[in-house]
Amino acid sequence: MVSTVRCVLYAIIPDATSVGLITAKDTAATGSGSAVSISAIGLTQDGKQFGPCGIRLDAGLSITLAGADTVTVVWSPL
């Protein structure tokens, strides 16, 4: 998933996955940018919450799944 606008990332929640890494980057292009979170995600985990205010991403949002099936990304544009 890629957002090309400034946004806030609030949470990454597993849907139907048991293993894998989720990488969230502050970028509007897949494959570039700085990682703001690298998380192991699984059904036995609660996912990753980024506090009540979230993480502000000025360049956009790119989520990369490595070995993971599906996740819900909670975010909003600014």
Image (tube, rainbow, N blue to C red):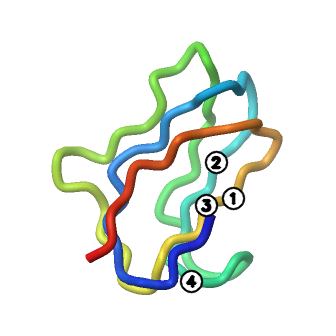
- Residue type at mark 1 is Thr
To which residue does mark 3 refer? 63
Q: Is residue 67 above or below residue 2?
A: above
To which residue does mark 2 refer? 22
Q: Position of residue 30 (x, y in %)?
A: 70, 76
Between the C-alphas of marks 2 and 4, the distance is 16 Å
Q: Residues within 10 Å of mark 2 (few under 14, many from 20)?
A: many
In the displayed structure image, the side of residue 72 where residue 11 appears, left or right:
left
Between the C-alphas of marks 1 and 3, the distance is 4 Å
Rendering quarter of residue 32: bottom right
Q: Are marks 2 and 1 in contact (CB under 8 Å)?
A: yes
- Marked residue nearer the N-terminal end (2 or 3): 2
- Residue type at mark 3 is Ile
Secondary structure beneath label 2:
strand
- Marked residue nearer the N-terminal end (2 or 1): 2
Residue at left offset 48%, top offset 43%: 12
Q: Which dot marks residue 51?
A: none
Q: Position of residue 53 (x, y in %)?
A: 18, 55
Residue at left offset 61%, top offset 18%: 43
Q: Which dot marks residue 64?
A: 1
Q: Residues within 10 Å of mark 1 (few under 14, many from 20)?
A: some
Residue at left offset 33%, top offset 72%: 77
Q: Are marks 1 and 3 in contact (CB under 8 Å)?
A: yes
Between the C-alphas of marks 2 and 1, the distance is 6 Å
- Residue type at mark 2 is Ile
Residue at left offset 78%, top offset 48%: 66
In the displayed structure image, the side of residue 17 where residue 12 appears, left or right:
left
- Residue type at mark 4 is Ala
Q: Residues within 10 Å of mark 4 (few under 14, many from 20)?
A: many
Q: Which dot marks residue 28?
A: 4
Q: Are marks 4 and 3 in contact (CB under 8 Å)?
A: no
